[in-house]
Each structure stands twice: as structure tokens, then as C-alpha cells.
Image (tube, grey):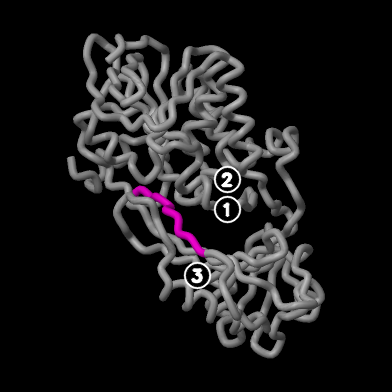
Amino acid sequence: MSETMRCDIVVIGGGAAGLGVAAALAPEAEVVLIEAEDALGHHASGRSAALYEPGYGHAAIAAMSRRSRPFFEEIGAFTPRGLLVIIPKGEEETHAGELADPRVREISVAEARALVPPLRSEVVGRCGLIEDAFDLDTDLMLQHFARTIRRHRGRIELGAPARSLRHAGRLWHVETPRGRFAAPIVINAAGAWADEIARLAGLAPLGLQPMRRSVARIALPAGIDAHRWPMLLGAGESWYAKPDAGALLVSPAEEDPTEPHDAWADDMRLAEGIARFQEMIDIEVRRLVASWGGLRTFAPDRVPVIGFDPRAEGFFWLAGQGGSGMMSAPGQAVLVGEMIRGTVSFIGADLAASIAPDRLLRDGRSPI
């Protein structure tokens, strides 16, 4: 094997998180990004619902999503979409809190039906509309990140899973089929495999849990044009549907614990989600155009893990975004740059502490 290449930072993972932070750091540091697959964004990043809704998720995620907005606007990644929350009759009180959110404007069932004509008004109790939600061109974003890395002479190595990861001489030594690299900082942005990377580095894992989510693309009946519909969200995030290139994406929005793998859809779960969709929307689903699965990875407290690991010099966690990684990636990259430089974080000390890895080492949830 060729001799070891020395650089400033090795980023492990070629999804939105890894690409975003590598692009942010490349102008001022020599960066190498390694990705196990033969394509960027192959796993969670390539199977996202691709919606930007900046109030979604933990407060730190929301702050990073808001920070991402100017970037998305600048590269032209936004298309107006909106998000319609649908609460069935009989469940109005149970889900009243979903309409109390200041981002949500309650609208009448008639108004909702004007937006989505096949809505079954006889079974819908209440509706709420979030207008500040956009389709996100995720491919454009990932390509922009990759071009930025290469423009600043950073390296992207595909088909390069980390085979070994050890710390010696104040450097992390990473061996891959595409070469050996050494850097004082390694960023673990490996998504569902983040705990596996920690084990490779000799660290006990933090308890990150991949959760499968299934999605189907369904054909629309003749005469139904859904391209202006908002995204539809069942109360309690029990299902969702989103217009997509003349069809609809429908998901049961499940979170089934699983092991890191190249996920596929669960047919029974898809059937449940489509049934819930059809209870609210008068569309006969005759066939699936396609289906797939993706993994959303959560820490035990469902809060992202971002920051240096106190057990190992230069080992940085960037994981556990739980399905919010796409819309927060540019802001997340800014945050990581600030943390590495030791400057004051834009999210503030309290939020920074809430996402730090050491919280999982001191509260009894870590296996350490």
C-alpha cells in the first residue's frame, strides 16, 4: 500500500453531514473525506423526504436549520411547498398541541380541502398549515458541497470504508482500500455506522440507534394534479404524503429499531401507512411505482451528538440527527467549524452543551 498521506482533517461519511462540514472546512484546512459506498449520499441523505421546515426537531437542530436558510436560498435549492397537518375526528383533543405551535395556522376543513381536493372532509376534525416549508433540492446541495471540497483541493475518496482507525503520535491513522491517511482530527459523520466507527477507534459506543423508515411512490389517478399540494402530515406523525414528480410519496413514518445496513422498505409497514393515508385522502392506490427504506439514527435522548469526545484527543462526533440532517447540514457545518476553531458557537453555550458527546458519558445511558 502507498505511504500515508498527512492532512489536517479526515471526515468519515459522505452524506449531507460529512459533505457539509468538509466543504465548510476545506477553504482553510487540508481535508480528506472517505465514504464506504461508491456514491455520495447513498444512505439516509439519498432517501430523505427533502422538506425544509425550520422549526422541526430539537432546539439545536432548529437553530442549525435556520442558519442553513441563506445557503439554500443562495444556491436556489428551495421550492415553496407548505405542510398541512391533518387531525382525524375524535382525536382533536389528543393532538391539540400540534396546532398550538406558533408556526401552525389553523385552517378550516373546507380551506384544507381547497388545497387538497381529495381530502375526506367527513373524517377530518381539524387542520393546521405551516406555510414556511419548502421542497429542498438535496442533490443540488450535495453536488454543491462536493464541488466546494474539490475546488479547495480537498479529496473525496469513494469506495473507501475505514478498515482501521488508531491514534498514535497525536494523529489519527485511518486505513482504507483507497489509501492511508493521518490527521490530528477525525470527524465521525458515519450516520447509522457512527457507533461502529467509534468501536474501530477503540471507544465504547454512545448507544446510537438506527431506525428504519419506509417510503412508497404511488401513481396518481387520471385527473388528479398534486404538484401544488402541501406536504400532508397525519396527526402524531402517523403518516405523510408529499408530491413528487407527478406522483406521491407516501410513508407510514415508522421508526423501527434496526442494525446499520442498506435499508429496504417493509411491505407490511407500507400497507399500514397507505391505509392511514387513504382513510384521510380519497385516492385509490392501485400500484406502487417504487419503494425504498432509509435509516434515521437517534441518540438515546433523541438529541444530536456534535462535539469532541473527551475520551480521545481529536475524535469529533457528528451524528444522531434523526432525519433532520438534510435541512440542517449547512448550519451544522458552520457550527462544527466554530467548535473546531474554539470560537463562540452561534447556538449558545446551553444548546452546545445539550448536544455534546459527554452528556451521554455522564448520565448513565452510555455503556461505558
* Label 1, label 3: how far apart the Cα atoms are: 18 Å
Q: Residue 36, image x and y in percent?
A: 38, 35
Residue 79 in view, yes or no? yes
Residue 353 in view, yes or no? no
Residue type of the residue flagged with mark 1: Tyr
Q: Residue 61, image x and y in percent?
A: 53, 44
Of 207 and 181, the residue lying toward us: 181
In terms of secondary structure, where does tag 1 sit?
loop
Q: Quadrant of the C terminus?
A: top left
* Label 2, label 3: how far apart the Cα atoms are: 24 Å
Q: Which residue is mark 1?
A: 56
Discs 1, 3 touching: Cβ within 8 Å: no
Which region of the structure is painted magenta? 291-300
Residue type of the residue flagged with mark 3: Pro
Q: Residues within 10 Å of mark 3 (few under 14, many from 20)?
A: many
Residue 62 marker: 2
Q: Quadrant of residue 126?
A: bottom right
Q: Residues within 10 Å of mark 1 (few under 14, many from 20)?
A: few
Q: Nearer the viewer, mark 2 or mark 3?
A: 3
In terms of secondary structure, where does tag 2 sit?
helix
Left or right, 75 with respect to 327, comes to: right
Q: Nearer the viewer, mark 1 or mark 3?
A: 3
Discs 2, 1 touching: Cβ within 8 Å: yes
| Dominant SS in magenta | strand
Q: Which residue is mark 3?
A: 252
Which residue is depicted at the point 59% across and 66% down?
Answer: 217
Residue type of the residue flagged with mark 2: Ala
Of 328 and 145, the residue lying toward us: 145
In terms of secondary structure, where does tag 3 sit?
loop
Q: Residue 296, image x and y in percent?
A: 43, 52
Which residue is depicted at the point 68% across and 33% down?
Answer: 71
